[in-house]
Amino acid sequence: MRAEAEGRPEDARRLFDQAWAERSDDFDACVAAHYVARQQDSAEEVLLWNAVSLHHAHAAGDDRVTEFYPSLYLNMGASHELLGDPSEAERYFRLAADHAAALPAGPYGDMLRQGITEGLNRVTP
């Protein structure tokens, strides 16, 4: 994540791909795929990796992913919105909103709650 924050996308992509290659369980796969998605070159690839991340969150099926669901659903909604599918985007933004109670207080949770609200506002007639 440091490489990404420092504006070194090639290094970030390599490190996230390495995390994916070294995943040890579904939780690791969920987190790694989430970050791999952020480094993709096309909206279709981003959607694919967001879907992989969500799949592994469901497969992990434990409390480690509870706070992660709002972000995963938000990303799925954003991917569908970007690809021109507002109804599917709305479905995922609503799922994100349904799970927002799991978000922690503070800047991270606030950022996600705002993203969910803004996403719904963009795609809801």
Image: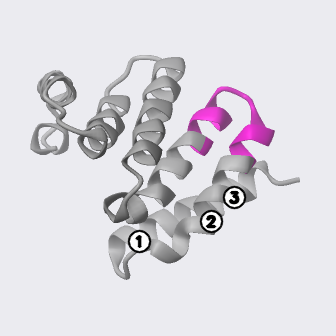
Above or below, 35 relative to 112 = above
Q: Residues within 10 Å of mark 1 (few under 14, many from 20)?
A: some
Question: At 54% across and 59% down in the image, what residue appears?
Answer: 115
Residues at circles 1 and 3 in contact by the CB criterion of under 8 Å? no
Q: In this view, does 8 lie to the left or right of 88?
A: left
Q: In this view, does 80 lie to the left or right of 30?
A: right
Identify the residue position indicated by label 2 in the image.
97
Q: What's the amino acid at mark 2?
A: Ala
Q: What's the amino acid at mark 3?
A: Arg
Question: At 77% across and 48% down in the image, what residue appears?
Answer: 123
Q: What's the amino acid at mark 1?
A: Gly
**Spatial separation of the CA atoms under disc 1 and disc 3:** 16 Å
Numbered mark located on residue 94 in the image: 3
Label 1 vs label 2, nearer the camera: 2
- Which residue range is magenta in the image? 77-90
Identify the residue position indicated by label 1 in the image.
109
Question: At 30% across and 30% down in the image, what residue appears?
Answer: 36
Measured as percent of width and height from the top left, residue 80 is found at 65, 34
Q: Which of marks 1 and 3 is nearer the N terminus?
A: 3
